[in-house]
């Protein structure tokens, strides 16, 4: 089985899907550590339960879910290739259920007071530091735009007073969620700090003259995301914000602010680009729950 995992990982990377390839490589390492010689036809419900027990030693529920869903994709590939018969499939209602693993992490947004402190955080004069705050605020103002989409934003995608982009997370599935975001005065003020030059990308994250391959863009983006998270933790510490502020918090805060101001879940779902109401309902419940968690900080 390890050989097939490595083949899929190589195919992913060759296709420019570096992040997915990395996930498969990680799975291959885990399987090799647990049972290097396991064959595809030996992956049964009992084997999966043992593998789960092994993962529980070091992984969160979310991590186990990712490994198991990736392993499920490997088994689907083996069936499609004719390597194993369909009746040997060990997942599903009568087999191993990946969905039982729920991440313990709950999206936690900034409160209104904390958000106001981030907005008014004084410039330090260090563009490398100040840019990270601008990226964070842009994610908030641009309807919860993901960091990957900000990193890949090009000047050609800004026209007629709007930002036009396809969410990268949906590109690999072929659904391609398209967004058009109005450039508000707040967004315009952020963009003013990034004058257009020879680089086709808007921000000082990617440079098409340097990061020409998917691998280079992937590693550069991860490095810059880590820098943003480190910067926002420092900003939080200076402001007395007692929570872990990362790039994801900007997206969660956007949704929470809308809910606080009475925006309907349907409108929230449209703003996020959710394909179905169930996704929005789940997301809204998590945000509301995290708001209640925050009340306990006031005690």
Image: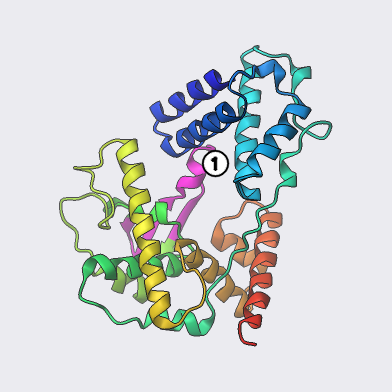
Per the image, the residue denoted by label 1 is 175
Quadrant of the image containing the N terminus: top right
Question: Which residue appears at 40% of the width and 53% of the height?
Answer: 149
The number of callouts visible is 1
Q: Along the line of sight, which residue is nearer the eye, 215 or 170?
A: 215
Q: Along the line of sight, which residue is nearer the eye, 274 or 297?
A: 297
Residue extending farthest top: 82
Q: Percent from the top left, x then y, of residue 240?
A: 45, 82
Q: Percent from the top left, x then y, of residue 4?
A: 55, 19
Residue extending farthest left: 198
Magenta region includes residue 27: no
Give left or right: position of 29 versus 54: left
Q: Is residue 66 above or below residue 139?
A: above
Quadrant of the image containing the C terminus: bottom right
Question: Which residue appears at 45% of the width and 60% of the height?
Answer: 145
Q: Secondary structure at mark 1?
A: loop
- Colour convention: rainbow
Magenta region includes residue 166: yes
Q: Along the line of sight, which residue is nearer the eye, 31 or 173?
A: 31
Residue extending farthest bottom: 299
Q: Is residue 4 above or below residue 48?
A: above
Magenta range is 158-180
Quick one: label 1, few (<14), some, or many (20+) residues within 10 Å? few
Question: Which residue appears at 52% of the width and 82% of the height?
Answer: 112
The answer to whether residue 137 of the structure is visible from this angle is no
Give left or right: position of 288 versus 152: right
Q: Is residue 252 above or below residue 240?
A: above
Q: Percent from the top left, x then y, of residue 37?
A: 60, 18
Q: Quadrant of residue 191?
A: bottom left
The answer to whether residue 47 of the structure is visible from this angle is yes
Question: Which residue appears at 45% of the width and 24% of the height?
Answer: 11
Q: Percent from the top left, x then y, of residue 111?
A: 54, 80
């Amino acid at each position: 089985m390890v050989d097939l995992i490595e083949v899929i990982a190589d195919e992913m990377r060759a296709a420019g899907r570096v992040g997915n390839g990395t996930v498969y490589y990680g799975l291959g390492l885990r399987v090799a550590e647990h049972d290097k010689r396991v064959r595809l036809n030996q992956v049964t419900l009992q084997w999966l339960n043992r593998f789960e027990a092994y993962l529980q030693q070091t992984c969160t529920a979310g991590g186990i879910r990712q490994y198991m869903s990736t392993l499920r994709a490997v088994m689907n590939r083996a069936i499609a290739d004719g390597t194993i018969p369909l009746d040997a499939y060990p997942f599903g209602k009568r087999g191993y259920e990946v969905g039982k693993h729920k991440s313990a992490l709950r999206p936690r947004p900034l409160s209104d007071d904390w958000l106001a402190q981030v907005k008014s955080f004084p410039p330090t004069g260090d563009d490398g530091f100040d840019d990270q705050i601008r990226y964070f605020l842009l994610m908030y103002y641009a309807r919860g735009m993901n960091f990957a989409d900000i990193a890949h934003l090009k000047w050609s995608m800004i026209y007629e007073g709007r930002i036009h982009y396809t969410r990268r997370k949906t590109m690999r599935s072929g659904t391609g969620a398209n967004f058009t975001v109005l450039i508000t005065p707040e967004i315009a003020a952020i963009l003013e700090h990034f004058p257009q030059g020879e680089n086709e990308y808007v921000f000082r994250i990617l440079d098409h003259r340097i990061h020409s391959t998917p691998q280079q863009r992937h590693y550069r983006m991860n490095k810059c995301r880590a820098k943003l998270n480190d910067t926002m933790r420092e900003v939080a510490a200076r402001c007395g914000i007692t929570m872990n502020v990362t790039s994801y918090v900007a997206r969660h805060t956007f949704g929470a602010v809308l809910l606080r101001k009475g925006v309907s879940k349907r409108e929230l779902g449209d703003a996020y680009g959710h394909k179905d109401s169930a996704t929005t309902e789940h997301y809204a419940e998590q945000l509301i729950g995290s708001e209640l968690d925050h009340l306990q900080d006031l005690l």
